[in-house]
Amino acid sequence: MHGFVLDSLSLLFALLSTSNLAVGIPLSDRATDGLTVSTAQGPVTGTLISPRVRQFLGIPYATAARWTAPSAPPQRSTTFNANQFGTTCVESLDPSHNEFLELSGAGTLGADGKPLVHGDACLSANIWAPSTSRPQGTAVLLWVYGGSFEFGTSNFAAYIGQNFVDAHDDITVVTFNYRMNIFGQPNAPQFAVDGQPQNFGLLDINAAIEWVHSNIAIFGGDPERITLFGQSAGSVAIDAYAYASAASGSGKVKGIIMESGTLDLALSVPIGKIGTDKADVDSWNAVAKAVGCGTTGNAAQLACMRAVDPNVLEKAVLSTDTSFTVIADDATIFSDTRKRAAASNFLHVPMLIGSTANEGDIFIVAEELLELGFTIPGVETVVSNAITKVAFTCPAKTAATDRTQAKVPVFRYQYDAVFPDISTRDDLRAYHASEIPIVFGTYNASTASAAPTANEIALSQYVQSAWVAFARNPTSGLTGNGFAWPEYGATQQVVLLGNDANPAGKTVVAASSVDADCGIIDDLVDAYNDIGFVISLL
């Protein structure tokens, strides 16, 4: 696959039916129970899915015509029934993506166990908030899913926020959809305008943050305590937001949690300028030709592409074996980000950042099952370890160091746990995205036959509590409250989660034990600026 693709590979362990959990509330009681609330666009009615949690699904947070920036959703005169997930933005699921989802026990079904519905009108958000009998004005965790900027959805069982809210006071969880692949970043020559935002999926993420900040108070959240958390491409998007928001000093986000993805990797790959990188333009024209819109690169071609059915476009992307990922438009992603990092020109909010110990395992296994064909014994582990270091561990170190040099509080972790219902093969260790069901407490949604272990359940409770503690107070939530996490800048220490020394909790180690060889790797990436083989696996 072309492009840097930090694939987050949306990991989703299917089959948690939210509709079956819903508890009916008489209409006359809904106002007092907080099930009907008035957003800026009109009233919304949710459901009480447990005595402690209110759920609101599929609320439109923005609207956007194809390849235009999102704008506020239309006003409603009637009550929006927020009892089911919204349409999923059109995905590009190639064989390696599908293999990843199968290996992780996720499959490709929605949270209700049904096939996903895809379409252009897909910009919706989901909220899990404490019932009104519990304390309100909570901290907010706002999730950005991964998937290489090519696939993913908020409608996955692994991303359901109920467990967070059921188990903890002072937290509300929000997830949402954003546009991906050719719909999110077409990389078309018609958009070659310097300084104009062209990564439409990143603009969607910005719009979701704005909508949550403006509306979360009526759901019981505190708009002044929003923390972004995301994995893989979602984590990259958060890093991009931190740089793009530096000038405004955006007070809307007070903390960021970045799991297995940084903008630094994206910048290590020649992603080029909008509409000028030949490979990107070739991808656009290949799809345009396949759907009968020609290769002229003019306004007529763009109008033709906008009129094509979204499912036809999706099939053309797959049939032409093209890939569409984010690009430097000098508005949402900057071509001089390393210079900006050196000048501390990013959002100065506390950061919790980390990765898994064996990120590359699932990429290698997926490619082997697709007949990559390694013939030298042990080479799989060598290549997996290289992917882990080059694409995840060392970029996390760089991002953490950039922040500490600016006196920004940083907490760093490495997830090292292996459980039979998540790592379903002997050659899958703590792979890319294996921490997600632990963070969300959704390990029961796995399609694997093995049951969660006692250590797994305990580790999930610990990790989830740590993420909540950070969201409540990003500066000191992890240093106190019984967590005693070391601040990275002051100690150069990393918290290992779920390793053999403490499979149900944390172990603190020197960063040097995690970052071995990062100096050499950074030099190689800088020298060659091309890690094509590794990136092709992501």
Image (cartoon, grey):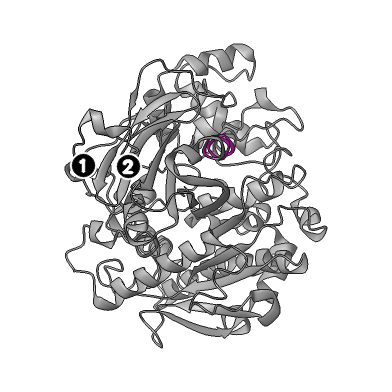
| Circle 1 residues within 10 Å: few <14, some 14–19, many ≥20 | some
Instruction: Please give left or right for residue 132 compared with residue 479 in the image.
Output: left
Mark 1 secondary-structure assignment: loop
Q: Position of residue 386 (x, y in %)?
A: 54, 70
Residue range (magenta): 206-212
Q: In the image, what residue occupies the spot 71% across and 28% down?
A: 192
Q: Position of residue 512 (x, y in %)?
A: 63, 83
Please say if the residues under marks 1 and 2 sit with CB atoms less than 8 Å apart. Answer: yes
Q: Is residue 83 visible?
A: no
Q: Main secondary structure of the magenta part?
A: helix
Q: Mark 2 is on which residue type? A: Gln
Q: In the image, what residue occupies the spot 47% across and 64% down?
A: 467
Mark 2 secondary-structure assignment: strand
Query: What numbered label is drawn on residue 22?
Result: 1
Residue 211 magenta-drawn? yes
Q: Residue 325 lies in what quarter of the image? A: top right
Q: Position of residue 89 (x, y in %)?
A: 42, 33
Q: Mark 1 is on which residue type? A: Ala
Q: Nearer the viewer, residue 255 or 106?
A: 255
Sequence-first disc among 1 and 2: 1
Q: Position of residue 142 (x, y in %)?
A: 49, 48
Residue pushed farthest bottom? 501
Residue beneath label 2, please? 55
Query: What numbered label is drawn on residue 536?
Result: none
